[in-house]
Image: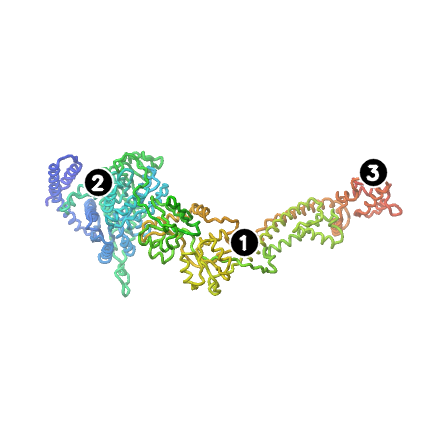
Amino acid sequence: MSSEYLSLSPLLQTHTCLFVRHFLMFPARISFDAEKLLFMTFSFFAILTTFCEGPWVAVAQSSNSDNATTIPVNVGVVLDLQKWVGKMGLSCIKMSLSDFYSSNPSYNTRLVLNVRDSKQDEVAAAAAALDLIKNKQVQAIIGPEASLQADFIIDLGNKSHVPIISFSATSPSLSSIRSPYFIRATQNDSSQVNAISAVIQAFGWKELVLIYVDNQFGEGIIPSLADALEEADTRVSYRSLISPSATDDQILQELYKLMTMQTRVFIVHMLPALGSRLLAKAKEVGMMSEGYVWILTNGITDLLSSVDSSVVASSMQGVLGIKTYIPDTPNLHNFMVRWKMKFQQDNPSILNPTLNIFGYRAYDAARALAMAVEEMGAANSTFQMLKASTGATDLDNIGISQNGNKLLQELATTTFTGLAGNFGLVDGQLESSAFQIVNINGNAARGIGFWTLDNGLQRDLSSVNTSKYSTLKSNLRSIIWPGDSTSVPKGWEIPTNGKRLKILVPVKNGFNQLVKVTRDPSTNTSQVTGYCIDIFQAVIEKLPYFVAYDLIPFALPNGSSAGSYNDMIDQVFYQNYDAVVGDTTIIANRSLYVDFTLPYTESGGAMLVPYKDDTSKKAWVFLKPLTWDLWLTTVCFFVFIAVVVWTLEHRINEDFRGPATHQVGTSFWFSFSTVVFAQREKVLSNLARFVVVVWVFVVLILTQSYTASLSSLLVVQNLQPTVTDVDQLLKSGKNVGYQHNSFVYGMLKEMKFDDSRLISYRSPEECDALLSNGSAKGGIAAAFHEVPYLKLILSEYCNKYTMIPAFKTAGFGFVFPKGSPLVPDISRAILNVTEGPQMTEIENAWLTSKTNCQNSTSSVSSDSLGLDSFWGLFLIAGAAAISALLIFMVMFIKRNWQEVTSSSGSLWEKTVELGRRFYQRDANSHNFRKGRFGDGVMNDVGNEIAAVETLENTHFPPILSSDSSQNDVLTNEQGMPSTEQGLPDRVEEGCPQRAVDVELTNVN
């Protein structure tokens, strides 16, 4: 072909693209004939352009083939070629490579596509990938299309170090962190959850329902979406899973269930094929009317062009959606025109093909791979084959790509402006961009605002608010809601079309705290109350939807019970009633016919046995209340306090003076008698009084604690059961009891109890009478039942009986027919009730003991008291005593130090003298003066002589001096004190102030 013709090709391309672009943007009001004419003209230009382009491309390829540096690089493509996304994706990949190498003819590498059809099957996709890696030794694989197919192919990529590049697998479970060789050339589904949360916050909805497809694609987004909604203080009240192969009847059944709920806000996450069916059925049952809110994820809105416009117009009116934002650029328009021409050329049977976001992603992914391969080069593009072992499979024989890691690094750093915006990978996946909020009206989606990570909701991307993140609904344009309403739905309603459940309740003669049926003969109506009923009502209130029900007593016309618990369960099994609510025990045999909810009471069965009167006491039981270390510490402190009190008192208190044995005995008597507060000696020193007060407080605490602990020990010794296990009962041959019409009868038979030894009871009072009589008098030795029943008996007779574990049960549960959809919801609601404070309130209202006795012996502590419980008290007492001693010693030394140190004796003599003064009584003490002189005045000579004799007998210590003349002054020739000279001087030395008073008194 001539060069002039070749030069005409680009010009012709440009004019053709401009014409087609103008054609695509032509107003919709033109007539059908005009549209047909324009289409024929468009087809002519397409053929002409293709004719001109073909040889030009061939020449380019031919010239490149002459370049010795051009290296082909094998690349695999695994797509569902039978589906639209696969066909469109492959076409965009081919166009991307053609455009890339046409604009870069000097590049040394060329990607060679090896295409495989996965045939909409996970196994076929994995087999195709294995074939490409093993036989074609591809350097990378583009695809697969679906997240389910990608899961296994990713493992093959990791094993062979071949990057797997998917432009449409959006499930968050395909984490690039977990799979380093998986490249997600599209956005993760989780990237939109904050946009959805912002919309929910904008309108203030607090509860919603998640509806999603039951596969990896549907479940992948749920954890992150639930977290985002929880941060927005919005509760997911129900999760509805729709099978990918669900029939219309199954979809209708689920929608009818949703209609019974109060919540009217639904978030839908699934692909358009299933989503359009779901919304069509929702329209059919009236769930597209005013008051409902439907929010679609980008799984549907990004592919809305693939949905039949008639379905959109009839079934999706008023629906909100989150759509990935694609910037509208001239390059994008140019590609759309060229792609449509090329696709129709290759697929003439497909009329009016539509391009969606996955086509743009496929185009950008192929371009990114071509750029990365060119940057990497094709050197050493081989596989290292592993040494195969005997019996190895195809998986064991695949090699490892030598360029895989390097290619992965090049892809991670590749950035450019693609058709869908900026292309750049963060942690192996395309970084998040803005989302557009759309409102479906007519047969298309109308943009009402945008959401960005930095600014939240905003009306236009150009009006960027950099101040703060916003979730205001004023940032969105007006919305037309389902039912052509312009008012914002409140998000909930009380349903009125729900079915009323017929629920059986047992009629009991005893244990009415659990279930009580009160019949009014005049109106022939019954009122049902009790512990089990209150729990059921609380559970129903916790359900995310409304359930209407009627409680029907299982009774005969005369009001008596119509049968056993098994008979009630049979009524549910035969579908005569919808449920059983009451004290129904969950056991394996019953679960074969009905479904039970989770238990709402503690599990297990026990036997109730009387206490035995054991009057034998251990000889040394009185030592058990305290541990040995506490006993030893207490005795040591008694001795220590005795020493401290004697030290503080013996110089001034006659009670603590006398012979040494007397002083020791008195001191210890005083200290130990504080145990019973029987001390008779007076304490005269203020320091001693302070020590004694603190010590008496410690003794008081110790004695009270000892008394309480000893009482507990004696009580525990007395509260011993008469029977400790079931085997003991079996060997003894004594009678045992069970509740009438209870399953316990069958369990006792299984335990090998003889039928003649089994006695039934109907009420706690009858059980108490049987236990009180005992087996020898026609009563029973033990009563078997579940823990809740026995607790009711103990609440009235706790001082007489105790519980011994005997057998295992699951507890009480509510009964529903097999396969009832209410069972999982009610079970979850039971958990909410039992874990909250409401359960405690119900138990206190019905099961609390009405007597002032303990429920079990477990509340009686028999542990010995240890030093760790009282070391603080001993610390206080020791600190007080030591402080008093220090104060006393300082005062004593200060008073006598000068006199002792002024002598000329040796240090030992001075120390001995100081000790002698310490041991002697303190004549200067107010206590001694008060005791010797009294309060009166000595008016006669006899009193004076008595005073003088008293002073003489006080044994004042002599002055340490070598001058004996001083002593002569104190006595006369007969050895008596001199009243004229010596008395004043001597008194002055020993007790100056008081002696002067005495002398003046004598003169007067």
SS at mark 2 in the image: helix
Q: Residues within 10 Å of mark 1 (few under 14, many from 20)?
A: some
- Cβ–Cβ under 8 Å for marks 2 and 1: no
SS at mark 1 in the image: loop
Q: Is residue 782 above or below residue 246?
A: below
Q: Nearer the viewer, residue 142 or 564?
A: 564
Q: Is residue 603 above or below residue 971?
A: below
Q: Nearer the viewer, residue 560 or 334?
A: 560
SS at mark 3 in the image: helix
Number of disc labels: 3
- Is residue 90 at all visible to an observer of this figure? no
Q: CA distance from mark 3 to mark 2?
A: 130 Å
In the rendering, which numbered label is found on residue 861? 1
Type of amino acid under label 2: Ser
Q: Residues within 10 Å of mark 2 (few under 14, many from 20)?
A: some
| Quadrant the N terminus occupies | top left
Q: Is residue 413 above or below residue 469?
A: below
Residue 214 x %, y %: 28, 50
Q: Which residue is mark 3?
A: 1001
| Quadrant the C terminus occupies | top right
Q: Nearer the viewer, mark 3 or mark 1?
A: 1
Q: CA distance from mark 2 to mark 1?
A: 74 Å
Type of amino acid under label 3: Thr
Q: Which residue is mark 2?
A: 314
Q: Give the color scheme: rainbow, by chain, secondary structure or one colour.
A: rainbow
Q: Nearer the viewer, mark 3 or mark 2?
A: 2
Q: CA distance from mark 3 to mark 1?
A: 71 Å
